[in-house]
Image (tube, rainbow, N blue to C red):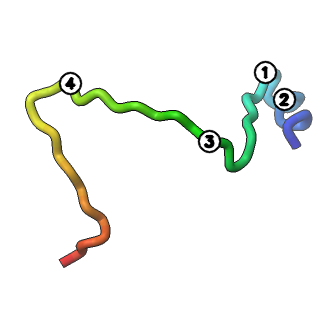
Amino acid sequence: MIARLESDLGKAIGTGTFGADMKVSLLNDGPVTIIIDTKNRE
């Protein structure tokens, strides 16, 4: 599938590992932080 996409698009396609452990960090750089809780839909 990846080889076909690369051939059709004419450029490399990035791939990864399904279920890989990702290290993510967050920097809140602004005057307001808005928290959206999607579990509470009342």
Q: Residue at x 73, y 36 (%)?
A: 16
Q: Is residue 6 left or right of residue 15?
A: right
Closer to the observer: label 1 or label 4? Answer: 4
Q: What kind of element bears circle 3?
A: loop
Q: Earlier in the sequence, mark 4 or mark 3?
A: 3
Q: Amino acid at mark 2?
A: Glu
What percent of the width, then of the height, locates residue 10? 82, 22
Mark 1 touches mark 2? (CB < 8 Å): yes
Q: Is residue 12 left or right of residue 38?
A: right
Label number found at residue 11: 1
Q: Is residue 41 left or right of residue 3?
A: left
Closer to the observer: label 4 or label 2? Answer: 4
Q: Quadrant of residue 32?
A: top left
Q: Residue at x 68, y 49 (%)?
A: 19
The single residue placed furthest to the top in the displayed view is: 11
Closer to the observer: label 3 or label 2? Answer: 3
Residue underneath mark 4: 29
Residue underneath mark 3: 21
What percent of the width, then of the height, locates residue 34? 17, 46
Q: What kind of element bears circle 2?
A: helix
Q: Earlier in the sequence, mark 1 or mark 4?
A: 1
Label number found at residue 6: 2
Q: Is residue 8 left or right of residue 37?
A: right
Estimate the spatial distance between the alpha carbons at disc 3 and disc 1, rounded to whole Å. Answer: 27 Å
Q: Amino acid at mark 1?
A: Lys
Closer to the observer: label 3 or label 1? Answer: 3
How many neighbours does mark 2 have within 10 angstroms: few (below 14), some (14-19), or many (20 or more)?
few
Estimate the spatial distance between the alpha carbons at disc 3 and disc 2, rounded to whole Å. Answer: 26 Å
Decide which of 20, 41 is in the foreground and name it.
Answer: 20
What percent of the width, then of the height, locates residue 41? 24, 74
